Amino acid sequence: MVKICVNKHILFHDKIIENYTAEIPVKILAKNQILSIELTDKTSNDTLIKNGKIVEDKFLKIRKIYLDGINIKNYIYTARQKPLYHFKNQGDKTVKGDHLFFQGPWKLFYQNPPKQYLTKIAKGKQLIKTDQKHLIVEKFMSKIQNLNVTNTL
């Protein structure tokens, strides 16, 4: 069972078998957003261990997330999960990545409108900062400001 929420508003809570694509329109337009994805039914019985090695396990791999039509695959690595482990002191208190092996919400913080927010982040990570490139980015940013906002996961 996987639960997908934006700002604690449940958008999806159902069983996922093999691969699954969820297209979920989000109508929550507040500026600050928290996307959370969580396994909700994993137990220690879902991990099969033989000779001290995991041979079978239930997990969720996040392959793609689109916000406002933008694939944010690289950005999802900034999200964090606080796993609810099966046993005390089993692992790190916080985990980064695109796999969920334990219950506990994986959270990604972003802002609306997503296109503008993600563009600002990309702008801040530019390695080459020339006046000409700055003008190109500012022109692009002004075009994005005029786009309609749709927020789909």
Image (cartoon, helix red, strand yellow):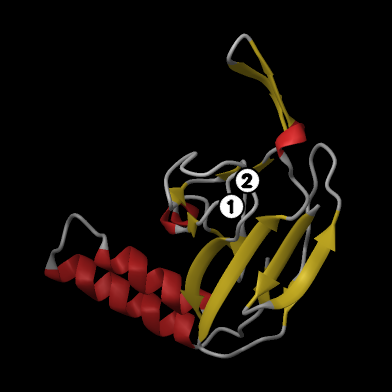
Could you tell me the amino acid type at mark 2? Phe
Q: Secondary structure at mark 1?
A: loop
Drawn side of residue 20 relative to residue 124, left or right: right
Q: Residue at x 40, y 70 (%)?
A: 119
Residue 91: x and y, percent?
46, 40
Residue 60: x and y, percent?
68, 43
The one nearer the camera, 125 or 50, is 50
Q: Is residue 112 visible?
A: no
The one nearer the camera, 34 or 87, is 87
User: Which mark is in front, 2 or 1?
Assistant: 1
Name above or below for residue 23 compared with residue 31.
above
Q: CA distance from mark 2 to mark 1?
A: 6 Å
- Residue at the top extreme? 51
Q: Secondary structure at mark 2?
A: loop
In which image quadrant can residue 50 be found? top right
Q: Number of marks in the image?
A: 2
- Indicate which disc residue 84 carries: 1
Name above or below for residue 46 compared with residue 78.
above
Residue 44: x and y, percent?
70, 37
In which image quadrant can residue 46 be found? top right
- Indicate which disc residue 47 carries: none
The one nearer the camera, 56 or 60, is 56
Drawn side of residue 44 relative to residue 93, left or right: right
Drawn side of residue 42 relative to residue 109, left or right: right
Q: Residue at x 82, y 63 (%)?
A: 13
- Residue at the left extreme? 130
Which one is earlier in the sequence, the residue at label 2 or at label 1? 1
Could you tell me the amino acid type at mark 1? Leu
Q: Which residue is mark 2?
A: 102
Q: Residue at x 13, y 70 (%)?
A: 131
On-image quarter of the C terminus: bottom right
Q: Are marks 2 and 1 in contact (CB under 8 Å)?
A: yes
